[in-house]
Image (cartoon, helix red, strand yellow):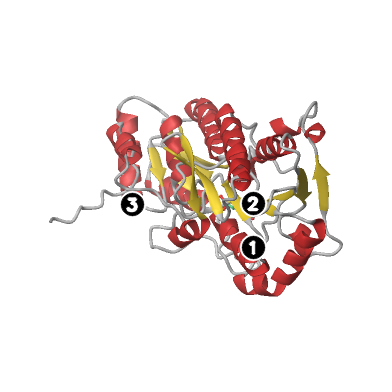
Amino acid sequence: MGKIKKIGILTSGGDCAGLNAVIRAVVNCATRKGWTVYGIRFGTDGLTSRPLQYEILTPENFSDTPWPRLSGSYLGSLNSGVKLESVKNLSKNFGDGARELGLDALIVVGGDGSMNIVSNYCHLAGIKMVGIPKTIDNDTPITDSSVGFDTACQVCTEALDSLILTARSHNRAIILEVMGRDAGHLALHSAIAGMADVCLVPEIPYKIDSIIKKLKEVKKTGRNYALIVAAEGIKREDGRHVSSSQNKIGEKVYGGVGQYLSDEINRRCKEFQTRVTTLGHTQRSGNPTSTDRVLAARFGVRAIELLEAGHTNRMVVLKSNTIKDYDIDEVVKVGTKRLDLKSDYITAARATGMYIGEEIPTKKA
Ligand code: F6P
């Protein structure tokens, strides 16, 4: 690859805290090398639609402005669901757009779905890219963590801390429904940090009777309140999803399982009244934590270093607190990262008394 002069950066998929800190890191680092940075607006839409939607970014956009300290995406993002078939049709526009701007490479800040879609665009259009993982779900594979996850955990933990106050005033078990799609990372981390009594995740089957047993145990200890964390992606006890909503391309839209649990527990358990709190999109818009801001800076700078060294089609990753990089096709091949049932997070939850679903018997060798 020739010497880099111009790069583009776009954010893709659901927004989260820390995206602007990533953009700032990329812009500051790249412009110090004499490169020009084009901020592509609204994800891939900025390159596929006409007129092109972009803005040349300079350090001034992010110095003495609140932007890098805020969540959301300064550039806007695209989260409307894109089918791989439409990528084929739009890839010419995408490539022409990137060439019209004279981009030598593209930095894509996205989750596992976006890495798949945008790397396909780039392959088809012959554009070089480096990916930076972000998602509150922490389900992007290979990397230990993604930008935005820590802040979302903080939002959920603070919610649990405040919910105990009202729960104890009214002898209630409060169910906090959190996001995370088909992975239980956000639910489990928040439940451990918020010291919940029950945590239900999509990876582990549960029984309402077992939840009630746990609630009775709590009551016996003399405590008159309890906290239950439910991941939005869990199913009803009978294995069906509560919501049948779908997005434009037929992917499930989750939400509502907290109310189902509340109704079931209320009906079958006399020890506690239940109530539900659904945090929804506030989980994506908390004040970026120091952990997310630092990760954003480390990822952003490594992405620039990779481009400078001529390494593309890579995604930066965090591995044992060291920044590394990985082939994007491999990342896409692995697919969604779900909870590792053998991890010490599960052990820590169970060993501290939390009910996190039924023990899955391990196969005898
Ligand atoms: O992937 C991030 C996420 O916030 C999921 O946790 C959630 O299911 C989904 O996005 C919600 O997306 P939307 O913004 O389309 O409602």
Q: Are marks 2 and 3 in contact (CB under 8 Å)?
A: no
Residue 258 falls left or right of residue 209: right
Read off the residue under disc 2: 108
Secondary structure, mark 2, is: strand
Work out how far the residue at label 1 is from the one at label 3, CA to CA, in angstroms.
45 Å
Type of amino acid under label 2 = Val
**Residue 201 got which mark?**
none
Read off the residue under disc 1: 122
Work out how far the residue at label 1 is from the one at label 2, CA to CA, in angstroms.
10 Å
Q: Mark 1 or mark 3, which is nearer to you?
A: 1
The answer to whether 39 is drawn above or below residue 296 in the figure is: below
From where the camera sits, is residue 139 visible? Answer: no
Which residue is rendered at x = 38% and y = 62% of the image?
238
Q: Measuring from the top left, give residue 307's x and y in whole percent.
A: 62, 47
Q: Quadrant of the N terminus?
A: bottom right
The foreground one among 100 and 177 is 100
Work out how far the residue at label 2 is from the one at label 3, CA to CA, in angstroms.
41 Å
Q: Quadrant of the C terminus?
A: bottom left
Type of amino acid under label 1 = Cys
Q: Mark 1 or mark 2, which is nearer to you?
A: 1
- In primary-sequence order, the first of circles 1 and 3 is 1
Q: Measuring from the top left, give residue 273's x and y in whole percent.
A: 46, 39
The foreground one among 279 and 67 is 67
Residue 338 falls left or right of residue 291: left
Which residue is rendered at x = 54% and y = 32% of the image?
154
- In primary-sequence order, the first of circles 2 and 3 is 2
How many residues crowd around disc 2 within 10 Å: few (fewer than 14), some, or many (20 or more)? Answer: many
The foreground one among 356 and 42 is 42
Q: Measuring from the top left, give residue 188's x and y in whole percent.
A: 42, 41
Secondary structure, mark 3, is: loop
Read off the residue under disc 3: 207
